[in-house]
Image (cartoon, rainbow, N blue to C red):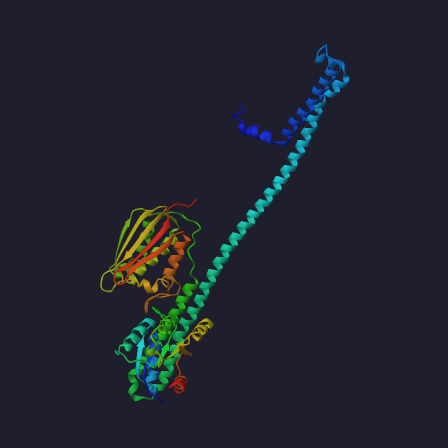
């Protein structure tokens, strides 16, 4: 399995980040895991990555329900960003929400390639890596 | 007398039986007048009109015409009056019924709007409940899977301890979320039907007393400058408003300075304006103005609470017939400006 340079987690829940980080490290699929706590935090991170101050992620795992800036607000801002960085970034929604509105809204965004339910499973993440990398 | 009783005169003229009586008598008078004139012209009347009337029985019968026609017309007018009155009553009844229906329709509309809003709130509640309850359960399952992965790893002793600690936290969070949600389902907006004149100072005094522990533990000071503070409200509604705003001001204090709250009131037109200013950490209104008063929304990461306080405040102010706005600067503080009706609206 390929090892990615960086996976970016956008998630406000501490334990979810703890677990996802552990799973990614255990599977050895990324050299680095960057953790941001909400959409705004993540935009700031991507801006730093654009200036070369942080590693540009190849995979983003995005939660929906977050304070300050939620997952949908992030994706709308993300889609406005200049394209040069984004072409090699894969955005996956990772959420607890089974709400049909949320699923429909996620599907309406071309930059969201997959919609995963928590918890992130080893097999699912493995399949994702095989499919896209 | 006529002028003084102008209304009476108008009323009498308005009545058809009187009008008909006058017309009938007037018309009837034409008969004896014309009859006597005709006789005089044809036969001459050397003895005067009166003696002619005494002699001629025909003229005496004709003389009865004003009485007969007067009585006849009076009863005719009475009939017309009766018909018009019953028509008028019927119309009045129809109008009253229409008014009643309009009132019912309006009441239904208001109830409908309230139900719709309640429904939207409930939907938001279910959404939040499913998310907030799922998160600790999913976390617990993830941590359990993690524990199984590291159980045979001799180097993972520290990791195992952290996992167990987090499992415990997940259970605690699950419990407190259920408690919060139960609290929200019992939540009711304060009734504002029995509004009365109230002094804001009295309500704030009670709120400060009930929040004494929080205020003292944070070394907070509350300064009051209540110039004009008589409003038309209920004390429970005002309590909800000031309790939430004061507790918020302390909870979202700036960690680098002691919390100070300044409450000023003054009269603005028919309203009383209450300004509640704090020196807390402030709100980024550019980003958050749409979310600030929304139910189940917390602006800050890891903020305590259920995200209903300001929603409740705004709804309560609006139910009292007032409105609330906010000004804020990050790192400086926040001012809530509340307008409340000063007197009972007519």
Task: Work out whether residue B285 or residue B123 is closer to the camera in this orientation and state it.
Answer: B285
Number of numbered tags placed on the structure image: 0
Task: Work out whether residue B139 or residue A5 is closer to the camera in this orientation and state it.
Answer: A5
Task: Work out whether residue B206 or residue A82 is closer to the camera in this orientation and state it.
Answer: A82
Q: Is residue A111 visible?
A: yes
- Residue placed furthest toward the front: B42
Q: Is residue B163 visible?
A: no
Residue at the spot 29% in from the left edge and 87% down from the top edge: B155
The C terminus of chain A sits in image quarter = bottom left
Residue at the spot 42% in from the left edge and 61% down from the top edge: B187
In the rendered view, tell whether residue B57 sits above or below residue A124.
above
In the rendered view, tell whether residue A27 sits above or below residue B123.
below
In the rendered view, tell whether residue A66 sits above or below residue A122.
above
Q: Quadrant location of residue A86?
A: bottom left
Q: Residue B88: x, y in percent?
A: 61, 39
Q: Residue A19: x, y in percent?
A: 35, 80
Residue at the spot 63% in from the left edge and 40% down from the top edge: B87
The N terminus of chain A sits in image quarter = bottom left
Q: Residue B266: x, y in percent?
A: 31, 48
Residue at the spot 46% in from the left edge and 63% down from the top edge: B120
Q: Is residue B277 left or right of residue B99?
A: left
Task: Work out whether residue B322 or residue B77 is closer to the camera in this orientation and state it.
Answer: B77
- Residue placed furthest toward the top: B47
Q: Is residue A95 left or right of residue A37?
A: right
Q: Quadrant location of residue B135?
A: bottom left
């Amino acid at each position: 399995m390929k090892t990615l340079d960086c996976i970016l987690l956008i998630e406000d829940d501490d334990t979810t980040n703890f677990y996802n980080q552990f799973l990614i490290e255990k599977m050895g699929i990324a050299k680095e895991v960057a953790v941001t706590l909400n959409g705004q935090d993540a935009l700031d991170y991507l801006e730093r990555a654009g200036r070369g101050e942080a590693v540009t992620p190849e995979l983003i795992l995005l939660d929906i329900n977050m304070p300050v800036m939620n997952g949908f607000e992030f994706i709308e801002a993300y889609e406005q960003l200049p394209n040069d960085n984004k072409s090699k970034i894969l955005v996956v929604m990772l959420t607890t929400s089974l709400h049909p509105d949320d699923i429909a809204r996620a599907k309406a965004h071309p930059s969201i390639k997959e919609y995963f339910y928590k918890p992130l499973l080893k097999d699912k993440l493995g399949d994702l890596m095989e499919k896209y990398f | 007398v006529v002028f003084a009783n102008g209304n009476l005169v108008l009323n009498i003229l308005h009545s058809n039986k009187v009008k008909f009586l006058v017309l009938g008598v007037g018309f009837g008078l034409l008969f004896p007048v014309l009859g006597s004139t005709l006789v005089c012209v044809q036969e001459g009347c050397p003895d005067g009109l009166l003696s002619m009337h005494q002699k001629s029985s025909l003229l005496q019968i004709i003389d009865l015409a004003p009485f007969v026609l007067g009585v006849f017309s009076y009863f005719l007018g009475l009939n017309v009056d009766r018909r018009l009155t019953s028509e008028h009553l019927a119309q009045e009844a129809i109008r009253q019924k229409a008014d009643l229906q309009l009132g019912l329709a309006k009441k239904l509309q208001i109830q409908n709007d309230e139900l719709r809003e309640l429904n939207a709130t409930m939907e938001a509640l279910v959404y939040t409940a499913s998310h907030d309850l799922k998160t600790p359960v999913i976390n617990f399952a993830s941590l359990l899977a993690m524990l199984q992965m590291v159980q045979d790893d001799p180097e993972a002793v520290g990791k195992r301890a952290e996992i167990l600690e987090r499992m415990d936290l997940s259970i605690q969070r699950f419990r407190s979320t259920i408690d919060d949600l139960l609290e929200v389902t019992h939540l009711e907006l304060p009734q504002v039907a029995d509004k009365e004149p109230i002094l804001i100072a009295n309500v704030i005094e009670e709120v400060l007393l009930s929040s004494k522990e929080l205020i003292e533990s944070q070394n907070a000071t509350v300064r009051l400058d209540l110039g004009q503070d008589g409003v038309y409200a209920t004390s429970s509604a005002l309590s909800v408003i000031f309790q939430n705003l004061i507790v918020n001001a302390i909870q979202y204090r700036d960690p680098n300075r002691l919390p100070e709250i300044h409450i000023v009131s003054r009269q603005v037109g028919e309203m009383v304006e209450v300004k509640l200013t704090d020196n807390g950490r402030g709100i980024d209104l550019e980003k958050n103005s749409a979310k600030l008063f929304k139910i189940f929304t917390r602006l800050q990461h890891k903020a305590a609470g259920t995200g209903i306080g300001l929603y409740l405040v705004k709804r309560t102010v609006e139910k009292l017939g007032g409105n609330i706005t906010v000004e804020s600067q990050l790192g400086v503080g926040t001012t809530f400006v509340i307008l409340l009706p000063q007197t009972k609206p007519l």
